[in-house]
Image (tube, rainbow, N blue to C red):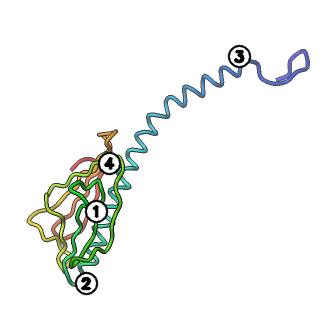
Amino acid sequence: MQHSNGYTGFTLVELMMVITIAGILLGMGIPAFGNYKANQQTFSTAESLVSALNFARSEAIKRRSTATIAPLTPNWSDGWTVATNGITLSNYGAAEGVTISASSPTAPIYNRDGRLSAAADISFSITVNSHSSASRCVKITLSGKPTTDSGGC
């Protein structure tokens, strides 16, 4: 914009209006980003658990032996391990800021045919500690195939 005195640029009022509008837009976007981050956290943890379950299942079939996926501590959120015949095959790290609760007190065990050796399906509920609305469910059917869905179990 050119003024009568020959100077170009923005006035203080124009600059304050731009800053105000930017602040309003930023204020509306921050809560949505928090929900996005919480949803991504549950998704990432669920996919890591499904990956470990698929790995345990494939190792049970490949080795023609049982394979177990168990928590490193009594709390699944502290990480889990895949083992067969007392040999640890893989460790998975802790899920920060996430709570994982299992429907069964026993760890999932895969038979040598890749099926789950349990009386019923096992499910894991994954929620973010700061956003209880962000949750996912990982379910293992008796056939041994893990699936994941958004929402609680």
Question: How far apart, in angstroms, are the residues tagged by discs 2 and 4?
Answer: 33 Å
Kindly report which numbered mark, 3 or 1, lies closer to the viewer in this rendering.
Answer: 1
Q: Which residue is mark 1?
A: 80
Q: Earlier in the sequence, mark 2 or mark 3?
A: 3
Determine the CA span between mark 1 and mark 4: 14 Å
Q: Which mark is residue 26?
A: none
Q: Nearer the viewer, residue 65 or 38?
A: 65
* Type of the residue with mark 1: Trp
Residue in the picture at 22% in, 59% down: 139
| Residue 5 higher or lower than 19, as above or below | above
Residue 115 vs residue 131: left or right? left
The Cα atoms of the two marked residues, 2 and 3, are separated by: 73 Å
In x, y percent, where is residue 46? 32, 57
**Corner quadrant of residue 31:** top left
Q: Nearer the viewer, mark 2 or mark 1?
A: 1
Q: Amino acid at mark 4?
A: Val
Q: Nearer the viewer, mark 4 or mark 3?
A: 4
The alpha-carbon separation of the residues under discs 3 and 1 comes to 58 Å
Residue placed at 49% from the left, 30% from the top?
28
Read off the residue under disc 3.
13
| Residue on which disc 2 sits | 63
The secondary element bearing badge 4 is classed as: strand
Q: Mark 2 is on which residue type?
A: Arg
Q: Label 1 neighbourhood size at 10 Å, few (<14), some (14-19), many (20+)? A: many
Residue 104 screen position, x and y as percent: 14, 58
Q: Secondary structure at mark 3?
A: helix
